[in-house]
Each structure stands twice: as structure tokens, then as C-alpha cells.
Image (cartoon, helix red, strand yellow):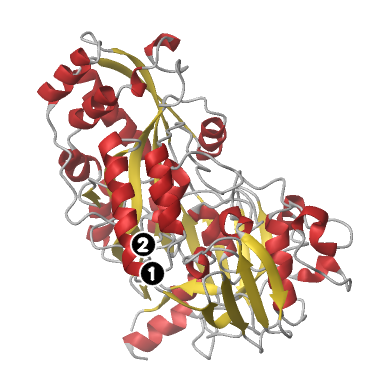
Amino acid sequence: MTQLALATALLAGGAADGRAQTLRIGLAAETTAMDPLSNEITSNYTATRHIFDTLVQTDAQQRPGPGLAVRWGARGERQWVFDLRQDVRFTDGSPFTGRDVLFTFCRILNNPTAAPGAFAEPVRNMENVELEGEHRVVVTTRSPDPLLPVNLANTAILSARAAGDRPMRFTPEDGCGVAGSFPSISDFNSGKAVIGTGPFALKEYLPGQRLVVQRNEGYWGPKPHWATVELRPVTAAGPRVAGLLAGDFDLIENPASRDLERIRRDGRFSEQITPSTRIMFLQPDTGRARSPMVNEGGPNPFRDLRVRQAISAAIDRKALVERVMEGAATVAHQFLPDGMGGALDPAPELPFDPALARRLLAEAGYPDGFSLVLHASNNRYVNDAKMAQTLAQYLSRIGIRTTVETMPVSVFFTRRRENEFSLNLSGWGSSTGEASSFLRHWVATASREEGLGTRNYGGYSNPELDAVLKEALHTMDDGKREALLRQVVSLTVRDLAAIPLYFESSTWAFRKELAFAGRVDQMTLAAEVQPAR
């Protein structure tokens, strides 16, 4: 038997057709729920994207392409028309139609257990959703929405089975005519509502322990190589790497930088390092006169731009990339990598200048600095806890007496949402490939009705910025929209509403018999893992 044939047989567990039986993946973060519309975080996308499809799909480079919609186009400035695939069935055997799309949009606005604003921004701007036959959906928006198709690229389409046979209409305020109640988060976690059209179907879900999916033999697209995929969260990097080396995993996410050399020396494994759009940044509390974790609850220094400038100048971004991230990142002076839509070209450099930082603090009235608790997760981002400690050292050197509190991401997200922090280390990956993704969520003044500022936990508000951003979000001309977005990015960098640090790169390690190119959105999708050629 040739080496290639032997490798194939081993991958296949002896299967004569060369198809592997099980792929075992070690995840770096836990899935919070199997409800694909509960939270817009990568760990949830990674899990649910195996089972659920979207109208528009993005490839590994975040380029949009056909998904459940084979084509789409604008009718004037306030209508989008989506033509749907006609050969698709859900895993329960029911046919996919426009009714499922209508049901999904209605459920997004009737989902009390979703994270605040999750998936709601594009749907709140919908004035009406109509069906022209079973496989055409016409969306009329309240105001022009040039990014609607790409903004739906992470919106999983649910089965409308729960709606029964009653007529449906797009009236979210009265439940759209759905009989009874929409499926709850517990219905998804139990598996009852996990009915998708994706490449895999649910086999088992044990929260915090494992997710097991099996190949959907009726999938409309290319069949995945794997008959079964087991995804297990191991949030500590050491045990995750140990599991790979011991043969418990075939592929793992984000091995710690210190372990990469050990993996390379082993000879049984390959690695993939892929730059991402995930910006890591500090979010200061600029909205409150007094903030709980800074200056011992006294007057809030972060409201003074000079203090935010001092924090930025205190940090050596190049050292963060080289020493903490060991090269698996790139320095950030704005919120989207160079060359992407709305990014400054070039962005003005944010200097590392501790002397300037101390001078700015003195000018702001803090010559002796102040006390601060910096908050971060310890199992969400690459080297997040270590990064927080390093940032604290930089701030302490200019007189900001900084202690660090890290916690699991589930706790971190909850406490951040409750505005318990004064300065936190956060991350965000652009889902649209342009600057609006970050700006509308993190920088715009919070407005639930407009779907803006859903993650503006710092309370930053700038009417000038809001006006330009809203104009950009409703501008159909791509060139004009990009110019407007660059204005908003300039204002954000000027005010340091968020303090950019670096763009993460994602790392995967896997057995040499496998091939995986990685994704800039950081998702790990089993259908994209193949036997090495």
C-alpha cells in the first residue's frame, strides 16, 4: 500500500470509499447555546454554522457568495429581492421556502433570550417582507440599506415548522401570525429546534462538554468529507495542545505561542496562521461622571481626551505583537486592516511615547496618576489574560496604578453588558468586510430603535460622528459610502472612543494528514478540513 493510500485508510478508519469517519476538534472557547440567533460571537458561529445555512455565505476570505439565496439584487433604493434555491430540504425532510426566511426574521425580533441587539440591526430596518411565490423573498426597508445582503451573512435560517400552517405576515409586533410561541433557547439546547439545511445534522449536544454532528446526506451542496465531527471546548491552551499531542484531537484552535515550537518539532503536525479582521482594543468608560473601577469611584478621568491619549501613548504596540503574540498579530492604528472598505489609507500612527503620556496625564490634572482595575477575559482571545497583564504594566509605568481582573468569557460578557467595567480589553471581527461593522456596534450612540451602539458599553457619544455614520449606512453608492466611513473612522481615532491595539491572527494545529487553510473570520468549519493531497 502506498503512503498516500495508507494515510487515506487511516483517516477513513478503514472505510473502503476513503471517507473519514470522525474528525475531532479542540475548540478554544465554549459555545454558549445551540440557538444560532442568540449571540453574535465566533464560538457560537463555529458550532451552529455546521448545521444551519444563511442566505448569503462568505468564503474563507469573507467574500460574499450564494448560500440559500442563489442571487439577490436591489429594486430601487429600498427593496432587495432574494431568489432562493429550490432543491433544499431541512434535516426533518421539510422543503425550504421563503416562509422559513420570513419566520426567521420574525423570530429575531421575538427572541427575549438573545444577547441585546443580536442579529436585530438589519431586521429592525425592514418595513415589510413579502413572498413572491415559494422561492422569492422581497424585503422593503424603512431607509436605504446597501449592506443588507452581507449583513445577513451570519443570520442562520430556521425552519418555520413551529409556525404550523397558519398564514404568516411580517408583523413582528404581534408575532407574525405564528401559532403558539417561537422556539426558545432551551428548545435549541435540547436539540428539539435544531433543524437546519447545513452540511451536518445534530447528533448530540452537552453544554460545556461536546457537540457531535453527523453528515447531512441530503445536503444541497458538496458533501463534507467527514461522517461525524466531534467538537470539544478546551478553554486552556495547555490541555488543548496536550490533547493534540496525545491523539485525542485531530485539529485544535489557537495553540499558545509558546507551544508552537514544540508542535513544529514533533513532526506529526502542521500549522496554519491566518490574519484576521479581529481588532483587539481597549474600551474606556467615557459616558459616566463617576466610574466604578477607576479613581476609586471618584471623578472619571476617561472623559478627558488627554487621558485616553495618554493610555494610547503608554502602550508599545510593536512589543505586544512581537513578545506577547509572538508575531501572530499585526499592529493596529485603526479598526480595520489596511485596504478594506472605509479604512484610512494610511492610518496615522499612534505613537509609543511614555514621556508624552505622563505629560498628558499632568495636563489633565492627574500628575500622580490614578488607580484602575483593567478587566479582560481569560479564555476568549489569543493570550487575553497575558495581554491584560502586559497592558497593566505599561499603564503602571506612567502612574496609572493598574490591577487586572480576568474571568471566563461567559462571566466577562455578562459583567461588561451590565456596565461594571471602567476599562476592558475587547475584540471584534468585522462581518461585512468594511468599517461599518465595528462603528455601528461599538462607537455609535446607543439607540435600540436604530440598532446602533449595541456594544457601546463605554457610553461614548458624538453627534457629529453619528450623523456621518447614519448617512454612510444609508448610502447605496459604494464610493460615497466608503468616503463617509473614512470620516467616521478618523473621528473615532481622533477621539479614541476605543483604543486600537492589534489585529489577531488565528492559529490552528493539526495532524499532517489533514489540510486546512483557515478563515479570516476565525471560524473552524469541519467541511473545510480535508485530507492532505
Amino acid bearing label 1: Asp
List x then y, in percent, for residue 259. 29, 49
Question: In the picture provided, is 111 more to the left or to the right than 154?
Answer: right
* Of residues 408 and 16, the one drawn nearer to the viewer in this rendering: 408
List x then y, in percent, for residue 64. 44, 74
Q: Which residue is the site of mark 2?
A: 481
* Of residues 15 and 175, the one drawn nearer to the viewer in this rendering: 175
Where, by quadrant of the figure, is residue 298 drawn?
Answer: top left
SS at circle 1: loop
Question: In the picture provided, is 425 more to the left or to the right than 145?
Answer: left
List x then y, in percent, for residue 511. 37, 68
Amino acid bearing label 2: Arg
| Neighbours of disc 1 within 10 Å: few (<14), some (14-19), many (20+) | few
| Neighbours of disc 2 within 10 Å: few (<14), some (14-19), many (20+) | many
* Of residues 409 and 333, the one drawn nearer to the viewer in this rendering: 333
Question: In the picture provided, is 200 more to the left or to the right than 177?
Answer: left
Asked if disc 2 and disc 1 are in contact, CB closer than 8 Å, the reply is: yes
Where, by quadrant of the figure, is residue 59 drawn?
Answer: bottom left
Residue at x-position 76% and y-position 53%: 184
Disc assigned to residue 477: 1
Residue at x-position 25% and y-position 52%: 328
Give the spatial CA distance, label 2 vs label 1: 6 Å
SS at circle 2: helix
Question: In the picture provided, is 167 more to the left or to the right than 510?
Answer: right
Image quarter where the C terminus lies is: bottom left
